[in-house]
Image: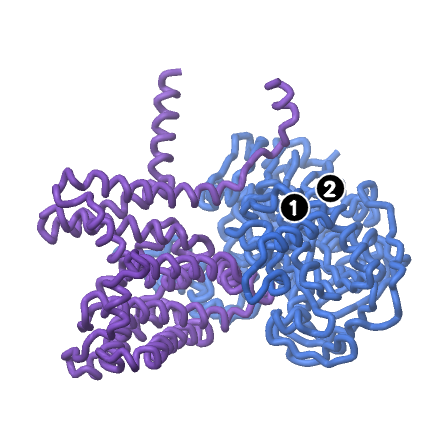
Chain colours: A blue, B purple
Amino acid sequence: MDASSERQPMLAISGLSKAYGSTVALEHVSIEIGTGEVHALLGENGAGKSTFVKSLTGVVRPDSGVMTLAGAVYAPRSILEARSRGVVAAFQELSLVPNLSVAQNFFLPRSLKHWGLNSRLRMEEKAAEILRRWGGDIPVRQTIERLTLAQRQQIELIRALERRPDLLILDEPTAALTDPGWLFEAIAERASAGGAILYISHRLAEIRQVAQRATVLRNGRSSGALRLAEASDQDIFLAMVGRSSARSGRPTPSARRSDACRLVVNDLRARNVDGVSFELREGEVLGVAALEGQGQRELFRALAGEEKQTAGQIVVEDRLQSFSCPRDALKAPGGIAFVPEERKTEGIFASLPVASNITLPRLSKLSVAGVISPTRERKAARDAAAKLDLGQRYLPFRIGALSGGNQQKAIIARALMTGAKTLLLFDPSRGIDVGTKETIYAAIRSFADRGGSVLVYSSEIPELISLVDRCLVLYRSRVVASLANAEMEEDTMMALLTGNPASASGEIGAQS
Amino acid sequence: MTVEATLEAPTDTRRAARFSGEALTAMGLFALSAGMVAASPLISPALGSWSQIYTILLLVSFLLVISFGQGLVILTGGLDLSVGSVMMLGGVLTTTWIGGDSATFWGVMPVVLAFGAGIGALNGIGVAMVGIPPFIMTMGVGIVTASLALGYTGGTTLGAAPPPLLLLMKGDILGAPSVIVFVLLFCLVAWTLQSRTTFGRKVYAIGSSRRAARIAGVPIVSTTILVYATSGLCATLSGAMLVGYSNGATLRMGDPYLLPSIAAVVVGGSSILGGSGNFVNTICGALFLATLESLIAASGLGQGWRTILSGLIIVGALLVQSGWISGVFASVARRVRGAGG
């Protein structure tokens, strides 16, 4: 039926797998893109999209699987090799060099030469001509850092299009564009010239506009190709969030839950946080849901004293706070302890034993006149490890040698060790296995049962539904909804996350 | 029996490898030093005696004291290039402020030590509060300190060594050389400070990951200043000890100790990037370097060859320790086996 499936596919991938240490990013992913086809790739944050793109462009090497490009085996070892085979990507994290000019960026890594020297004039003429052809109105001598995000995105896209690749990969190409009309035309043109396009986006309406078929990634696994014309938005959302894998349980509110507010945030402003207000009660687990880059990171860091607060109030136990570093937050009434997303660089002390990693916040209580009592330290570490089901025998190990899940258990044990009554957990289950996740959920709930308050961000909606009492939805640096657990449904939330509060199953997307 | 044991073995049988590795390095260096002493009669019949060991211990005492401070700084991921100059200043102040007068020693010596700690604290302030790279900050402070000492003395060193320091470096206490007793006590205190106190643990945390330490609420600024102050204190103390040993202070008397103070820490197996290391290892590193030095000095080689030899041996020790050599052997063995099979 579909023209593209009859011809030889431009790209065929089967059984592609990639793991980073113990974290599986891709598992037996298969996809086929025909010549002249625009194929959409969908998936939640952390579903494996970026790893997939990196495998295609030679940035990472998959552990197993076969890729063929136009019938020939394809196993690129670098971006340059991928490019020479006709595979070009316009990245979401823009790959432009900020302190070089537009023209210089256009011809990276090989500048145009004149008598063996880089010729600025020739590059500027050529770049201006190319930009004009694509309808871009950008001064070619300007350095990239002085351009707007939209202009940068446009240059990134034009640079990729100009190479006329056989396979063009566009990763969230419209995220920063104000008027993507020209891009859709360019995509259609490339497709009619026989190129294949892999189009990655969260915006469903846009995908329906440009693509014919879609593959959904979920937890590193691929669905078969969906024909977009035959699939409803509902079907696609279900494929993305995976009703079947959702944990069905809902949390029971803790017995110690009270109406007393532990933390009141009022019109908080910081970089990328635009007037956020909420209340966190004693014994409550409050969730934060957001797609990537909606200000959740800065919100958590501002509450932890790690990001500068520009306006608004943070009130802890009825006292106004002003944090200049995380130490201040820990010393606030009751204490606020933060578990950051970057486990490797901000969480663990890689060269120290697990026990020292855990006991650090409580050392002064385990020592006499500054000298640590080894027996008391050992006991404290053992007790803390037991609470998180972390094996005793790991305690003397260097924490850097442990799996991500065990590292995370130790870091959460450390956060509990501070004695803080408020925990800020940023994506605490990212990249760890199911069993460990369950342990961490249980630890969070039992902390709340003892009267503690938790603010937790997660990139996985089912996780939030099964864990939190209430959930804030962040979109574009603001709280757009606050849902009680009973109101939390994956499809409604997905709609809110993408900025479409109107309906869950109707028209979703087209937001820019 | 064996089958049962295998069945019951846990899936993850790894041991806490780094700690035994660290101990291994320390023991290896100690054995090497002992071996060199034992073999030294082959080089010169005058060596290999108790007096040679005593000389080595005497020489190692300055190095140990200065290396402890340097080791703490390295543990935070920094480097203290001012220790040579501070050591000299310590020596100069000891001879000029105290001189040969026993009466003023106990009152003024603490002032001298505090002065050295203050210069170290200055390093710490520049590094932790202003954010100047340790390398530059300590180099600058070192140059200023050396110039101050030069200006203060007018280029000639005056004064004499205080008798209590002469007693410390050359006398006996309870039948044992007092310097050895003193160094043993110093090592015990230093090791406790580094490995058994909350302060030491914070230093490890900062060196292991500054960002994680910040998030965990470790007071980075005050701890860092304290670390550099300790280094200044140690350098000053070792300057005073050198005054007792050589019966006076000389300009540039600290310079020959700057690089060995770093080498002792690194040869001992600490990471130059910070976050790992142990004072026992630094002790063994310092012993190894001092033994090597005394042996090469006795070998009768020219100065050029002596320097080349000691440099090569240090690099060799580091290669063995980094596992590079065993790695090369392993890969050669693999290839040979691969070719055979």
Choose between B334 and B277: the one closer to the eye. Answer: B277
Chain ID at mark 2: A
Specify whether disc 1 shares its chain with disc 2: yes
Residue ID at (53%, 68%): A137
What's the mark number on residue B237? none
Residue lying at the far front of the rendered structure:
B174
What's the mark number on residue A435? 2
Q: CA distance from mark 1 to mark 2?
A: 9 Å
Amino acid type, callout 1: Gly
Q: Is residue A167 above or below residue B293?
A: above
Quarter placement of the N terminus of chain A: top right
Image position of A5 (left or right of A165): right
Question: Label 2: how many residues lie within 10 Å, few (<14), some (14-19) or many (20+)?
Answer: few
The answer to which image quadrant residue B159 occupies is bottom left
Choose between A149 and B125: the one closer to the eye. Answer: B125
Q: For residue A14, say whether it is visible.
A: no
Residue ID at (57%, 32%): A64
What's the mark number on residue A405? 1
Q: Is residue B148 above or below residue A423?
A: below
Dots 1 and 2: beta carbons under 8 Å?
yes
Q: Earlier in the sequence, mark 1 or mark 2?
A: 1
SS label for mark 2: helix
Question: Label 1: how many residues lie within 10 Å, few (<14), some (14-19) or many (20+)?
Answer: many
Choose between A135 and B299: the one closer to the eye. Answer: B299
SS label for mark 1: helix
Residue lying at the far top of the rendered structure:
B341
Q: Is residue B289 above or below residue A138?
A: above
The answer to which image quadrant residue B328 occupies is top left
Residue B74 position, x and y percent, is: 40, 60
Residue ID at (74%, 52%): A460
Chain ID at mark 1: A
Q: For residue B123, say whether it is visible.
A: yes
